[in-house]
Image (tube, rainbow, N blue to C red):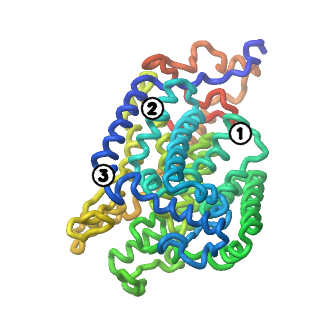
Amino acid sequence: MSASTSVDQRPSPLVIGFKPVLAVAVLAILAVIWHIFVIPIGAQFNGLFDNATDLYVYRAGGRAVLDGRPLYEYPVWGRLSFTYPPFSAVVFTVFALMSAVVAKIVWWAAIFFALVATVFLGMRTLGYKADRNLAVFAVSGGICVTVLEPVRTTIWLGQINVFLMFIILLDLVFLDLLHPRSRLRGLGVGIAAGLKLTPAFFVVYLLVLRRWRAAVMALVGFAITVAIGFLVIGSDARQYWTTYVTGESRIGRVDSPANQSINGFISQMLAYFDVRRFSQPAPVGPLFSAPDWLWMPVALVAAILGLWAAVVSYRRGRRLLSVTTAGMTAATVSPFSWGHHWVWVVPLLVVAFDFAYRGSIGGRRYWWRWLAPLTVCALSFSYWWNYWGSGSRYGADHIIAIGLFMMPRYPDPGVLDRIAVILYAGCYPLILLLTIIVTLVAEFRQRRVEASEEVTQPDTYSGDIESSGAADPSAPDTAHAESGVLRAEVATNTHLESSTQVRHPA
């Protein structure tokens, strides 16, 4: 073996070119214009920064802890109850100590930082070089994704889900950039679950991957949050874990269009087709609720398929796609998932952009790949609908609905209307379904290619590693594209936990 082949050969990092950076920067400007003029940023209640209802509830929960008042027995802010675990209320005491204005500014700034960091670190894990172009791309991308409904609603309501997503990505994906063999991996999942229960699904994800240590660390992290809750507010903690932990009625109507889960979709269909057998009286009209025997088997199938796709992505080295798929699966199988729970469309859009961009450099013209990011945006965009004649609400003379799932359900629909309602009533679970299909189809194709290569490969080898072509100068590992762009089909100088190359769908 020659000395040259003993050197650790790594693929060159992919340098994002000027054109995509410029394109995303232009889109960012259009996103700002959208926020200012389309849904006026200064509009009462509907303006981007004129709500923050959930942040007020978080602060009120923190204030209840500071004042020693009951946290779960009574509404903490207006008619709204605190529904999160006790640990989260302890954390929110920090914001209760701030004025409302300061708390909102800090919260919104932290959301934007998390979005930019998700784009930047997501691109880094996909093999892109950390340079000025990538920094501009990440900032512009962070602005662009604010027009996606889950992100806009997160900002509008002052929601926490962007932070939960970032903590999990930092724990299971981004940590590979700094410490690929960290013994604390999984701890972030436990802390996120202590703030809000839905991230506990990632313990199942880790167990399916047989990442035993990370799963144990997640349970340890969660146990620590539970212990902190009991130490600080013992009576409230006991009340929560014995009474309110499964209180769906404290969250909202299960048949709400905003419930973008399997349970929510089926309940919406029961309401839309007026299946009165599954309804019960409610203050604002019949409440339709899917029975457990109807929605749980469907959710179980969705969980199996989602975890299967996540495992396939993980074994192929696509760590970001794997965790993102698991996050969307968690939202799909949860009994109740508001639209803003689907902030996982942000890392999914990063993966989709990477998939499309690699098909347009090095002289390749796989234009159809751009359908991937366009589909993600089309299903999660902040569409709005003016319900004229609906009556005034919160200062507006009619109701304004935002999000594809909030589009109208006409009382006397035609066939196309019914199809449209079925489509947008479950638009976010549809994103997961499409992701699963693309992932599994790509895996089957890859296996066929690998099987055919094994058949055509000779049974004997020369035994010389140099003859394998790894060091063959006639097989370049990079190709020049626009503005000095370098093409790399695998992850670069970042050591992944599995130490395998990151392969992208062909």
Measured from the top left, where is residue 266 in percent x and y?
43, 72
- Tell me the crowding category of disc 2: few under 14, some 14 to 19, or many 20 or more residues within 10 angstroms, Cα based: some
Query: Dot 1, crowdedness within 10 Å: few (<14), some or many (≥20)?
Result: some
Badge 2 marks a residue whose secondary structure is: helix
Vertical position of residue 452 compared to residue 246: above or below:
above
Residue at position x 57%, y 26% from top?
129
Residue pointed to by mark 3 = 39
Query: What type is the residue that disc 3 sits on?
Result: Ile
Q: Are marks 2 and 1 in contact (CB under 8 Å)?
A: no
How far separated are the C-alphas under marks 2 and 1?
A: 25 Å
Quadrant in the picture for residue 176: top right
> Mark 1 sits on what residue?
498
Q: Nearer the viewer, mark 3 or mark 1?
A: 3
Q: CA distance from mark 3 to mark 1?
A: 46 Å
Quadrant assignment, res 386: bottom left
Residue 59: x percent and y percent?
56, 61
Q: Provide the residue designation for mark 2.
A: 357
